Amino acid sequence: MRPGPRNLVTDVSGLLVGQAHDAALRSGVTVLTAARPFTAAVHVMGGAPGTRETELLAPDRLVQEVDALVLSGGSAFGLDACSGVADALRGQGRGFAVGDQRIPIVPGAILFDLLNGGDKTWARNPYAALGAQALHTAAEQFALGSAGAGYGAATLNWKGGLGSASAVLPSGLTVGALVAVNALGSVTAGDSRHFWAAPWEEGDEFGGLGPAPRMAPPDAPLPRKRMGESTTIAIVATDAALTQAQAQRMAIAAHDGMARAIVPSHTPLDGDLVFAAATGARVLTDPLTDSFQLGHAAATCLARAIARAVFSATARPGDLQPVWSSRA
């Protein structure tokens, strides 16, 4: 496998990512969309998830495709970002047709960033407007680090952020990952700057330091955040033609990448979740081998994207945690 030309989830042809944040709020929204609906699925492994419309992503549901996927800060308030995205898509004539009405299908997930020092004393929920703003900025290029849903994110010991990575398989299929990292666990080994994801790094995409001399995880880590203050939310995407069931298997496999990059992950205090998206542009030529490799690539891309999120974070006045680059 090799990274795509951008090393972003938008190397999956047809996908676009839009982002918006509010510096005073210290929070933001990231939207994945495309010119036409795409197959989507989800798998949740954290104990404290916050989601919207994820139930309709099961293989036996009526609607098989979505118009956008949303990652947002703001805890439960951030779910309103999906409403802003849905309103904006409806204004574009997008959505599932029911008679003369169009209903945009916009599942989403949130992370908790309400205690990061930002001004959360709003009189009106700001996330719908941020969602609409994010959709209107959708493009192939987008910022990593302190951007979008990762703008106010944090990890155990570093400032968190928004990450992405991609891979092109020998078959020609492309896989990408998009993630907002706000984990209870750590993305680096011990007190070092060495990322747990180092064995899967491509070139020096997150510093090129390689694995730590001693990569053994702590025996009994203690949570340094309180209940509900965590969560890593992600999307893995491909240009393969997948059913919802196949897409869900890709999402399940991608959680391996989260476990490789964050120690510990999937805790009772995190809402760890992975969406899967499939545009259907390329038919599987060898369904067994292709599906096997898609799952592996999704996990690898997600591990790399998580490290890139923290690696790319930038300092802002009032930060409660150091950025990874400050400890060079």
Image (spheres, grey):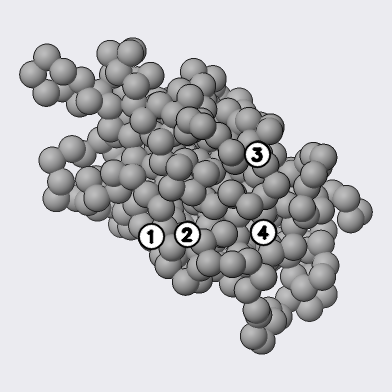
Q: Quadrant of residue 188?
A: bottom right
Residue 272 bears which disc, if any?
2
Residue 231 vertical position relative to residue 266 in the rendered view, above or below: above
Label 4: state its secondary structure.
Answer: loop
Q: Residue at x 89, y 55 (%)?
A: 327
Q: Is residue 283 visible?
A: no
* Amino acid at dot 1: Val
Provide the residue designation for mark 4: 155
Residue 119 bears which disc, if any?
3
Of tags 1 and 3, which is closer to the observer?
Answer: 3
Residue 270 vertical position relative to residue 97 in the rendered view, above or below: below
Q: Residue at x 15, y 22 (%)?
A: 97
* Amino acid at dot 4: Thr
Density class for disc 1 (Cα within 10 Å; few <14, some 14-19, many ≥20) is: many
Q: Residue at x 24, y 50 (%)?
A: 55
Dot 2 or dot 3, earlier in sequence:
3
Residue 44 bears which disc, if any?
1
Dot 2 or dot 1, earlier in sequence:
1
Report how far apart the C-alphas of labels 4 and 2 lie in the structure.
13 Å
